[in-house]
Image (cartoon, rainbow, N blue to C red):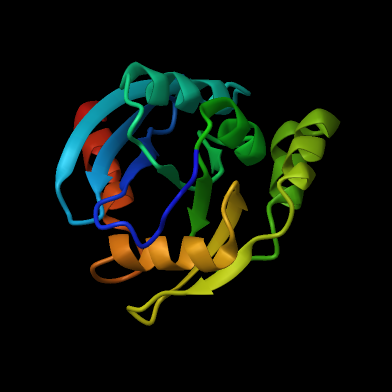
Amino acid sequence: MKLHPSKRAIRALGVAESFRSGDRTSVLAGVVMRSDGVVDGFSFGGATVEGDDGTKAILRLYRSLKRDDVNLMLLSGCIISLYNIIDVDGLSTESGVPVVALTYKESSGLEGAIRRHFGDGEDRIAQYRKLGPRTPMKLHTGYKVYARLAGISEPDAGRILDSFTLQGGVPEPVRLARLLARARRA
């Protein structure tokens, strides 16, 4: 699918999660929003806490919408539900849409935390390393985000993030998905 970041009303699927300590599954929420601010749909799913099904769970959530007009996905992170690692490239390939996975703080990475949590989890470390480095991106709001990109160039991702971010550093589809995930979990 060809993405036109300057198109008046592109649609993004914002995805976020919510879980509490002790939960076996997290709540995933997806919000379809047009770049002109109109909410155009939503869906719920779940992923296993400490599992390895995050990529499939997001793909199921995307497919459950039965929409062919979603132009890209904006993820609140690519490591969810206590180290359930999202294959950003695989998600983009399987869905046929670009993926932008965002984090909001600079860090030296999570390899040490993953090792502490899983011990000798070399498969999980390999998945984590496959994600590659994050790209720092400054938004028009003055905030900086860190992105992993699949199927989209850095300049196009920057334009799209700016069009979906009204204030702060969290794009509106992701912000609304967070609110829905928390409300559904409660």
Figure quadrant of residue 40: top left
Q: Nearer the viewer, residue 125 or 158?
A: 158
Residue 72 in sight here: yes
Q: Residue furthest bottom?
A: 142
Picture quarter with the C terminus: top left
Left or right position of 67 against 155: left
Q: Is residue 26 above or below residue 166?
A: above
Rendered location of residue 142, percent (x, y): 38, 82
Rendered location of residue 140, percent (x, y): 36, 78
Residue 85 in sight here: no
Q: Is residue 75 above or below residue 66?
A: below
Q: Nearer the viewer, residue 133 or 152?
A: 152
The residue depicted at 57 percent of the width and 53 percent of the height is 152
| Image label count | 0
Figure quadrant of residue 68: top left
Q: Nearer the viewer, residue 113 or 141?
A: 141
Q: Residue furthest left?
A: 38
Rendered location of residue 24, percent (x, y): 46, 19
Rendered location of residue 115, percent (x, y): 77, 41
Figure quadrant of residue 20: top left
Q: Is residue 146 above or below residue 3?
A: below
Left or right position of 110 against 28: right
Left or right position of 75 against 69: right
Q: Nearer the viewer, residue 39 or 55?
A: 39
The residue depicted at 36 percent of the width and 62 percent of the height is 6
The residue depicted at 24 percent of the width and 45 percent of the height is 33
